[in-house]
Image (cartoon, rainbow, N blue to C red):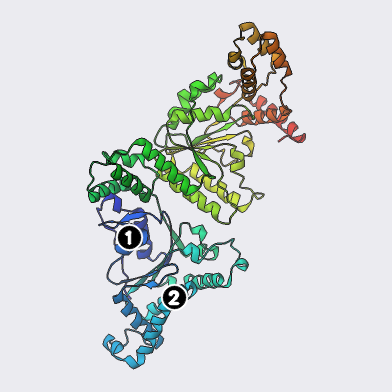
Amino acid sequence: MSTVAIQVPAGDLPSTSYPFFANLARIINSGQARSIVISGNIYDLYFDGKQYVPLIPFIQAKTQIPGLIQVLYELNGPVRVSDEDKTKLREAWAAWKNGIAIDAIPMREVLNDGSKFDLRRREFDQYLRDAIGNATQALEFLRQLTICSRTCLKENLLIMIEGADMLLPSGDGDVARMNDAQVRRVAIVTDWFGDPSFFGGKDTVLLFAESRSLIHPRISRLPQVLSVDVSAPDLASRKHFIQWHSVNTGNRSVPQSADTVAEATAGLSLHAMRQLLLAADYSQKPISRQDTTLQVEQFIQSQLGEDVIEFKKPSQSLKDVIGFSKLKEFLHTYLIPRMKLPDDRALPGAAIAGPIGGGKTFIFEAVAAELDMPVLVLKNIRSQWFGQTDVIFERLKRVLEALEQVVIFVDEADTQFGGVGEGAHETERRLTGKIQGMMSDPKLRGKVIWLLMTARIHLLSADIRRPGRVGDLIIPILDPVGEDRKEFIRWMLKPTNLGDDALVEWLDQEGLEQDFSSAGYAALRSQLKAIPPKDQEELKSIIRDFMQPAIKQTRRYQTLQALVNCTRRSLLPDPNISDKDRALMEDEIRLLELQGIR
């Protein structure tokens, strides 16, 4: 049998030069693998040179070449093959079953010798009928077709199996918990792909599934099974689809600018873009920025789930942040400009540490607003179902790669990302490892900015805290002191109209504890606003009655961890801190840990 090379058109339109197809053609033509998982954005539309079609018809159109027989198995449907190719397969099957190599006798003798081949031809047709609604039968039939092909077929087979994740579900990876039909299908495909004659041959099997991890690990972890990832549409693909839609609908006034809409719809699939364009066609109005933003948010949340992410629209800016004068200057002059850079000069992100109630979330929500980028709040990407955590992560990665620039906001990051040591669960280690890889991925530098909030910076993986990830910048958020503390006191007193300099000085020196937190000031302000005191004596009485909860040692421990993990001397209370001072902090941390403070 001769090798059939799949051609990748040169100089094609940007939208049709799909990198995943070039990768697929290279794997098949080189013989690198004969079993390939096609995963990722597999439910979208692709341009076949004439129109936009689903992925499988796109691959069929691009691989429609002499010497290659396409076989498609649809879930709960028939084994589909063209009439001409079905005749070739039927005769090859009959010859194989009769022990005759197709090259040994002229084809006309095979076709004319009805007595010898007719029974086997009917057997072939019966297998095709039996495959309908019987996935186990279909997979065994396809496996035998590849055996037949090696001796009795001049053409090569390209077998496409849709819904592989439903045919060969991962479950929890335990074969003992699978039903008999599922076990048999896994056994058939494992034997099929593990057969040296198969992966040394010329036939290829494509398994379509949103994620490789959804396919049973006995198959997906075979080293001879490779993956091809289909990414979300890029800017060129989105622009081409808008232009194609405009020409084919005859509505050339909507949208007014393909470039503008293509840029604004980063993150959308072409199916979702089609909905947006059809709505514009119907209303005869240009697509607004608000339309695209709403569509992007709805689509991404539908892909990942509202329990996984949410879009945040912070209403505050850094002008609304009380105190923190040195920090705000640092944010304006260093952090925000570096995060806005589009290339490898950009910061990958920052970790924000400090005691509970310090104002970390409020301050960095304001930073996110100043950046003027979409803000995704990562809520929970772990799933209780086996394999689903990997799927959620892969969807998240596709979304992030498709967006032009995005801020990932993670509150309580120490609970979101665990460790990678021996004590951590396998799923947790795998998830944390993937997140770490994404943080330092050069392709995402300048596109994805990570803001991790945590009161327990020491519980974040050391690999996350290293330079090149958010360890490039670890910022401590400490309780206000000096003029910043007085600014908080004035803000707290503002609803009462009683805040003269003498009262501010009394509160600073005597009335309030020195480790009073931002949350404490906000709580007192709320009380004073709800029940305004009549005079300063009543106000002082309210202040004296106010007691902080018994979390002083815990906050001290968290403050020390923020200080020893800080990566900028200029952000410390004393920029001239010495190694001896840091050693004393670490000694105090160990003493607190001996008391059970964590």
Determine crowd level at label 1: few under 14, some 14-19, many 20+ residues with C-alpha closer than 10 A: some
Q: Earlier in the sequence, mark 2 or mark 1?
A: 1
Q: Amino acid at mark 2?
A: Ala
- Can see residue 153? no
- Image vertical order of residue 313 relative to residue 569, above or below: below
Residue at the outermost bottom position: 115
How many circles with numbers are drawn on the protein?
2
Alpha carbon separation for disc pair 2 and 1: 24 Å
Quadrant the N terminus occupies: bottom left
Q: Camera-side residue: 243 or 158?
A: 243
Q: Please provide percent x and percent y for residue 537.
A: 70, 9
Determine crowd level at label 2: few under 14, some 14-19, many 20+ residues with C-alpha closer than 10 A: many
Numbered disc 2: secondary structure: loop
Q: Amino acid at mark 1?
A: Phe
Q: Please provide percent x and percent y for residue 157.
A: 36, 72
Q: Camera-side residue: 256 or 376?
A: 256
Which residue sits at x=40%, y=44%? Answer: 267
Q: Are marks 2 and 1 in contact (CB under 8 Å)?
A: no
Q: Which mark is residue 58?
A: 1
- Left or right, 53 with reference to 170: left
Q: Nearer the viewer, mark 2 or mark 1?
A: 2
Q: Please provide percent x and percent y for residue 545.
A: 73, 18
- Can see residue 200? yes
Residue at the outermost right position: 595
Q: Which mark is residue 319?
A: none
Numbered disc 1: secondary structure: helix
Q: Please provide percent x and percent y for residue 509.
A: 68, 12
Q: Which mark is residue 131?
A: 2
Q: Camera-side residue: 349 or 261?
A: 261
